[in-house]
Image: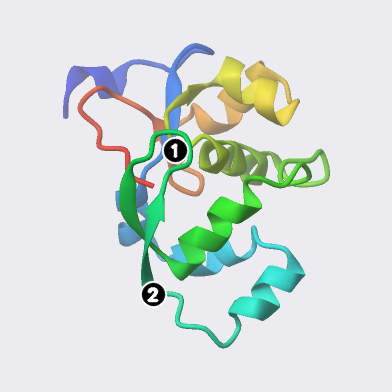
Amino acid sequence: MPLNYLIKPNVETKFYIDYDWWEQSRDDLQIYLLTHLTPEQQQALAHRNLDEVFDYVDPETGEVFQVDTLRLAIRESTKREDFITGHIGLIDSVFRALLVNGNKPLSAIELAEVTRRNAATILKTIGGVRIYRGIRPHHSNDAVEG
């Protein structure tokens, strides 16, 4: 295990969603992602193939990449003003903040700005030994896909 994995995170440590964690977890990422959609979106997707793949053009960069039906719906959800509110749990709020940011690593300070939660509380929750929903400290050699 690399030495940097033994360093205790601080409020400036960046965090990301480790999708490899989900592959090893008993939890189902697809089901969890569905919980982040509106009831209308969930109903619209109820009879669709969630694994169907589309070409998606990033409106900011012009980059074209493939995305499945569910991830496309999540991308649309992240644009809603009410996607991150004080009415959802801290872990869900942090997870959504990372989704909004395209899973680019964010520090507890940056997550606090997006979620309107306390940075120290965020760090205490996601900076410990237990990994919640695949959210873990980012190290320069970690791959970040989303």
- What residue sits 62% from the left and 46% below the top? 78
On screen, residue 33 above or below 139: below
Q: Is residue 28 visible?
A: no
Q: Give the number of the disc on residue 103.
A: 1
Q: How far apart are the two marked residues, 2 and 1, measured between alpha carbons?
A: 20 Å
Circle 2 residue: 51
Rate crowding at label 2 as few (under 14), some (14 to 19) or many (20 or more) other CA atoms within 10 Å: few
Q: Position of residue 72 (x, y in %)?
A: 50, 60
Q: Is residue 116 left or right of residue 35?
A: right
At horizontal 35% and vertical 27% (from top left) the residue drawn is: 138
Q: Of helix, strand and loop, which one carries label 2?
A: loop
Is 33 on the left or on the right of 140, as rendered? right
Question: Residue 129: percent from the left, percent from the top?
Answer: 43, 33
**Residue 53 sits in which quadrant?**
bottom left
Which of the two residues, 110 or 58, is positioned nearer the viewer here? 58
Q: Is residue 102 left or right of residue 93?
A: left
Tell me the residue at 72%/47% (across/down).
80
Q: Residues within 10 Å of mark 1 (few under 14, many from 20)?
A: some
Q: Between residues 144 and 53, which one lies in front from this camera angle?
A: 53
Image point (56%, 56%), residue name: 74
